[in-house]
Image: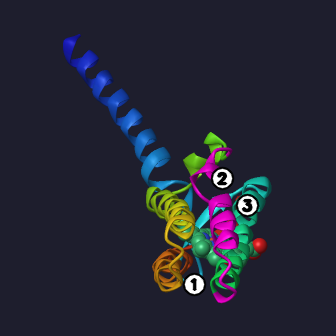
Amino acid sequence: MNKILTAIIILLLLVIGGGFYKFMIQGSTTESTDGRLAIQLNAGERDMVLGEMRAFLDTVQKIVKGVSEDDMKLVADSARKVGMSAQGDVPGSLVGKLPMKFKKLGFDTHTKFDQIALDASDMGDKDNMLIQLSVLMQNCVGCHAAYRIELEM
Ligand code: HEC
């Protein structure tokens, strides 16, 4: 009897552990034709992630414009918009489909935009802004090299 209980408990722990691994670490991914990991999302989730991406691109343009025109307010205001505060409304179901590394990179990118916003309003050092932007954009490059999005079946 005890052995059966132990076996059931171990089995349940494995199921929970597997669920945890799937939800937290691996996300909903498959191999894809170009060697990147394909994150499987539904249409609404995909639209949401890609909308965030276009906001990133828009912000990068505004930061470069701000630096080139010596307009640190433009740099600070646009960077702040895609900082951590922009991450609030990501639904839990989407969070579960994103691999841990992806979430970390996304989180780090929002944090770095916040840092740019802070430094733009504090110091307003243009060279420093460009250095920070160049480091931040390694996240864009790195993530795009590793992941793509596919519509789940
Ligand atoms: C955490 C991962 C990640 C980070 C960081 C990231 N992206 Fe993306 N981005 C993606 C993925 C995945 C796609 C979809 C690519 C695909 O399916 O081929 C994408 C797509 C895009 C698109 C296309 C949007 C569309 O409407 O099709 C743009 C533009 C973009 N990213 C800009 C950026 C910029 C600029 C940055 C950095 C400031 C950035 N991304 C950072 C993962 C990321």
Image: 15 above or below 45: above
Circle 3: residue type:
Arg
Where 24 sits versus 67, above or below? above
- C-beta proximity under 8 Å, tags 1 and 3: no
User: Which of marks 3 and 1 precedes in the sequence?
Assistant: 1
Locate residue 143 relative to residue 149 in the image: left or right.
Answer: left
Distance of label 2 from label 1 (alpha carbons) = 31 Å
The residue where tag 3 is placed is 46
Badge 1 element: loop
Q: Give the range drawn in magenta.
A: 68-89
- Quarter of the image holding residue 1? top left
Say if 12 sits above or below 124 in the image: above
- Quarter of the rendering containing residue 33: bottom right
| In front: label 1 or label 3 | 3
Query: Which residue is disc 2 drawn over?
Result: 86
The numbered dot on residue 34 is 1
Q: As rendered, which of 125 and 109 lies closer to the eye?
A: 125
Residue 10: x %, y % from top left:
28, 28
Local SS, label 2: helix
Quadrant location of the C terminus? Answer: bottom right
Q: Does the magenta stretch include residue 138?
A: no
Amino acid type of the residue tagged 1 in the rendering: Asp
* Among numbered discs 2 and 1, the one appearing first in the sequence: 1
Observer-nearest residue: 144 or 2? 144
Residue 14 image position (x, y, % from top left): 34, 36
